[in-house]
Image: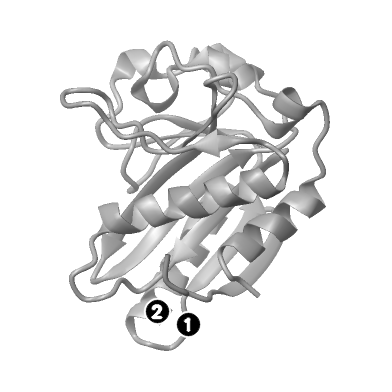
Amino acid sequence: MRARPLTLIQDELVEYDQAMERMTDLVGQRQREERPDTLWLLSHPSVYTIGRRTPAEHLPDPSHGIPVVETGRGGQLTYHGPGQLVGYLIVKLDEGEGIVDYVREVELRLVEALGKLGLPAERRDTPPGSELLTGVWTVETGRKIISIGMRQSRGVTSHGFALNVDGDLTPWSWAVACGMPDVDMTSLKREMGSADMDEVRKVVAEAFEAS
């Protein structure tokens, strides 16, 4: 994997709509060469986000009171909430490099980060005709721990990944995550017994050469 250093932005809890506005601004700055490639680490209050292809039957029961927001990224339904580390990647792709190529790099960097945190993990290739297996899974239990949904516009990426660290996993069971009814979502805390968000932020930033 070639070197691709990023500039790091860090925030705590940011409302999803506000984050989307800022991300759009960051993408515009990168397209105009006004800022370098950037990783923005943050978390969101509870919200479900859906892609344009998410079926209605995958949506949560509204009685749970968690808002559902349509977003412009690829992929299906994802849950965001406290205790989850979200990373938005605003990166200018090389000539001839596509978004699928970059998503694969993102998966591998996150696998490396989880390994350093003590959790063996892997990316998966999607069998023909199956729902996309984009993301990262645990090796030993086969559970999904990181969701990834990205897009690119005028050669610059946006959106990114969501790593479950130590938050409540219950809301995942109220909807169909990632277009896969049988997926078992997990977190670092569930797999390892404990997790420290500050340490996770540090290790993930290092995996993306972000400072």
Tell me: residue 124, above or below residue 38: above
Tell me: residue 63, above or below residue 65: above
Identify the residue at image location x=46%, y=17%: 183
Foreground of the two, 34 or 107: 107
Determine which residue is flagged by label 2: 30
* Quadrant housing residue 127: top left
Give the amino acid type for the residue marked by disc 2 in the picture. Answer: Arg
Mark 1 touching mark 2, by CB under 8 A?
yes
Foreground of the two, 143 or 69: 143
Few, some or many residues within 10 Å of mark 1 (<14, 14–19, 20+)? some
Determine which residue is flagged by label 1: 36
* Position in image of residue 27 (x %, y %): 40, 71
Camera sees residue 87: yes
Camera sees residue 160: no
* Position in image of residue 102 (x %, y %): 34, 58
Relative to residue 25, is residue 168 drawn left or right? Answer: right
SS at circle 1: loop
Identify the residue at image location x=36%, y=51%: 104
Q: How many angstroms separate mark 1 from mark 2 (CA)?
A: 6 Å
Tell me: residue 98, above or below residue 190: below
* Position in image of residue 67 (x %, y %): 53, 30
Identify the residue at image location x=69%, y=49%: 116
Few, some or many residues within 10 Å of mark 2 (<14, 14–19, 20+)? many
Identify the residue at image location x=29%, y=61%: 152
Q: Residue furthest bottom?
A: 34
* Position in image of residue 123 (x %, y %): 43, 38
In what quadrant of the picture does the N terminus appear?
bottom left
SS at circle 2: helix
* Quadrant housing residue 211: bottom right
Relative to residue 36, is residue 128 drawn left or right? Answer: left
Dot 1 or dot 2, earlier in sequence:
2
